[in-house]
Amino acid sequence: MQKCSQCGGKLRRVHRTFLERFGYMAIYACKGCEHEEFVPRRYRFHLGPHARCPSCGTFRIVKLKSPDRIDPMYVGVLNLVERLAGGRLFHCRYCRCQFYDRRRTAAEETAVPAEPPDGGQEITTPPDTANSDA
């Protein structure tokens, strides 16, 4: 039985509208606080700013240099499109599946330091030549 992320109460499955059926596999509502939790469809893992596993949706993936012969390759039309679009090979630690994706991982985005807008050079004036209006 699933529990609510806000109050810890039991969740019950609720009906989806016609448009919600295209985006979510299921919608659960808490019996106590009426908070709704959504379970997205798998194709939505291919949409977004960061690469994620198409099977389980985790962001904790690693890059591979060549395909692994032991772990299975994720089969799907979107995986083929990602490969043809120049995507890199990734591996999920939890599902143990391989897949292609053209986006960066969430860990790569946080590890890249932001450069200052002036090209990385800091301009300082010596203390003896500083102007003072006082």
Image (cartoon, grey):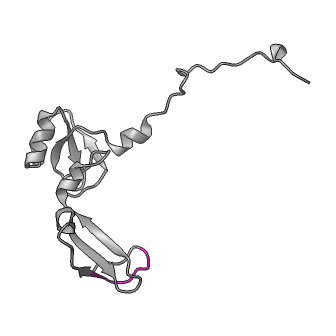
**Is residue 129 left or right of 55 when viewed as pictured?**
right
**Is residue 58 left or right of 97 when viewed as pictured?**
right
Q: Residue at x 53, y 26 (%)?
A: 117
Location of the N terminus (image quadrant): bottom left
Q: Position of residue 89 (x, y in %)?
A: 19, 38
Residue 67 seen in render: no
Q: Residue at x 24, y 80 (%)?
A: 13
- Tell me if residue 134 comes above or below residue 22 in the rendering: above
Location of the C terminus (image quadrant): top right
Range shown magenta: 6-12
- Tell me if residue 12 comes above or below residue 120 in the rendering: below
The image quarter in which residue 122 lies: top right
Q: Is residue 103 magenta?
A: no
In this orientation, which residue lies closer to the viewer: 45 or 89?
Answer: 45
Query: Magenta span: helix, strand or loop, mainly?
Result: loop
The image quarter in which residue 108 lies: top left
Q: Position of residue 36 (x, y in %)?
A: 34, 74
Q: Residue at x 24, y 49 (%)?
A: 47
Q: Position of residue 90 (x, y in %)?
A: 21, 42
Q: Residue at x 77, y 15 (%)?
A: 126
Q: Residue furthest bottom?
A: 32
- Tell me if residue 86 comes above or below residue 51 in the rendering: above
